[in-house]
Image: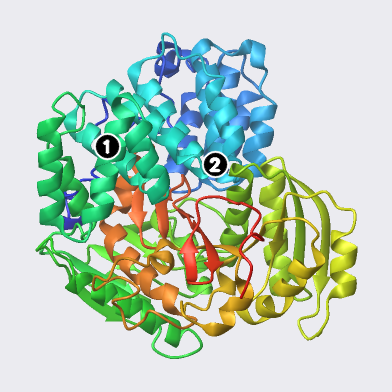
Amino acid sequence: MTKHQAPRRSYFAPLLAASLAVALLSGCAMTQVQDEATILAPVSSAELNRAKALETQGKSADAAKVYLDLATKAQPPAQAQLQIKAAQAYLAAGQTSQAGRTMDAIAQPSLTAGQREILLLTQADLALITDRPKDAITALERMQTRGLPKDLKAKRLGTLASAQRLSNDPVAAARTLDELDGLLEDNNARLVNQLSLVSTLSGISQTQLQTLSHQGSGRMKGWAEISLIARQHGADPKQLDTQYQQWKQRHGGHPALATLGRAYADTLTGGYQASDKVVVVLPRSGRFAAAAKVIQDGIEAASRADSGGQRPALDFSSSSSATTRKGVDYVIGPLEKSSVDALLSKRSLAVPTLALNEATRSTQVTNLFQFSLSPENEAAEVASKAAAMGAKRALVLYPKDAWGERLASAFRRQWSNLGGTVTGQASFDPSWSSYDKTLGSLLKGKDADMLFLVATAKMARKIYPQILAATDKPLPVISTSHVYTGNPGEAADQALVGLYFVDIPWMLDNTNSGPLSRRGSSAASGPLARLYAMGIDAYRVTPRLTSLAKSPGAYYPGQTGGLSIDSLGRVTRQLELGRFTKGGPQAADSLDGGLSEKRP
């Protein structure tokens, strides 16, 4: 066993197989599915072994074709079993369309009870990968939970919590994780789950959290109180644990484990072993050099602030060949998209690798994880936030260029996935001085709940006041982080008062002044500021990648958003909603029209 395969000290350690480690893409659950050998007994063992070998080699799409070929010659229930395995293999390959078609072709009446539940779980996984969390919830709610074995119940609840978070319903996700806590028996598994629960609640506003702690009932009231302690004392691990222990003494009947306070404090450190070696691959020249320098600053700052006493050795290099050096435990990078694409051809990487960009295609590669601050992801998050807050009809306004069209398309795609309707859209030329004609055509006679504005800060300062003037009733206008330069006191932002936008928590935290905070960092302003927070998260999440990926419902409270990992190894982020006010950008609890606060 190599060093990177050895057990590691991490409170996000993989859950035990007896509780949560039932992978969605495996074939074990109820008795009917556990006895897969019996179901597939009539099928050629040589061909089944060939398909399994292909999956082991990372050639999941080829394995899926073998399973489908076998299915054409098989009878129920073996036929459905092979089709399910083919769909799961396609998902592992990132070929979501093929996975969907394969599942659609399964004859539902021929399914055993166990196959039905596994199929529903697979459909839920497909829905999550394709940004349709509400469809995932629907599939999971169709499952017959009575009589299910504990492992399948646990997998369902973990997946449900993930879907609820992605639907911007963190309180529902926390309730689901609370239900999961009552199902688990192993305390290590419970600790991982409880950390995710508290982290999930940390995603709601201070006001919402206080309301839940005061007006909530039962266990949820206690979880909210713990989350408030974590939020208030997160910068001081010792104080956090002291306050938690005092709370625990007063609430002995609450299921929160005695070690939870210290464990939560430890999630805000690196989580490495002192002997670990991390290679960081970042360019030192070229057009990505400036971005790489800010990311490196964030990584080094997180290492200096690591209070766990287990700092790894950081080896910064501009060459990917450095990753093959002896004794490497983790890799952070590369940054360029083309270099990430090159990793997809390897099928399997020797150590956990956190690429700092997303590849141009989706596929599953062992030990490869992809972390990106994608503008398209922000546009999709605007859609998710607005839908979660009750909006159903949207207007879209974007600049006439490739960037504007990309973000508008990402919003429309996610808005459609969430059941929303685009009632009007228009593009604009940023060089125009007046947008009266465009706005009149877009707004006149349109029934909408919100307007999605794609713009930079410079564009928004010019067009947003004209939107206000052209609107005869309150209409929330939401944009991406591109409207906020990162300078909270910038006078020009007074033109944006009332405008909503999504951004990373690090940018909207106006209270924390610690060494890693926006206020306490020299990288607090400028167009690349958010990459500093990305560096912090890259350092902290890297030793937890494998366990986060394997633990259903696992969630990490990052500086760039609430972080989780999907079945293709992509790090998904949930952003915060911000709003420009007279006093500067602040976190917002909800959409109230955005027009009630008039500019001076």
Please state which of residues 157 and 589 is positioned toward the viewer in this rendering: 589
What type is the residue that disc 1 sits on? Gln
Quadrant in the rendering for residue 108: top right
Which residue is pictured at 9% across the width and 48% down the height?
Answer: 242
Please state which of residues 102 and 37 is positioned toward the viewer in this rendering: 102
Above or below: residue 63 compared with residue 57? above
| Number of marks in picture | 2
Above or below: residue 320 compared with residue 289? above
Question: Which residue ends up furthest to the top in the rendered image?
Answer: 147
Which residue is pictured at 43% across the width and 40% down the height?
Answer: 53
Near mark 1 (Cα within 10 A), the count class, few <14, some 14-19 or many ≥20, is: many
Tag shown at residue 167:
2
Q: Is residue 107 left or right of residue 308?
A: right
Query: For mark 1, what is the residue?
Result: 194
Q: Is disc 2 placed on a helix, strand or loop?
A: loop
Q: CA distance from mark 1 to mark 2?
A: 20 Å
Residue 331: percent from left, percent from top? 31, 66
Q: Are marks 1 and 2 in contact (CB under 8 Å)?
A: no
Whether residue 129 is visible here, answered yes or no, is: yes
Residue 541: percent from left, percent from top? 31, 58
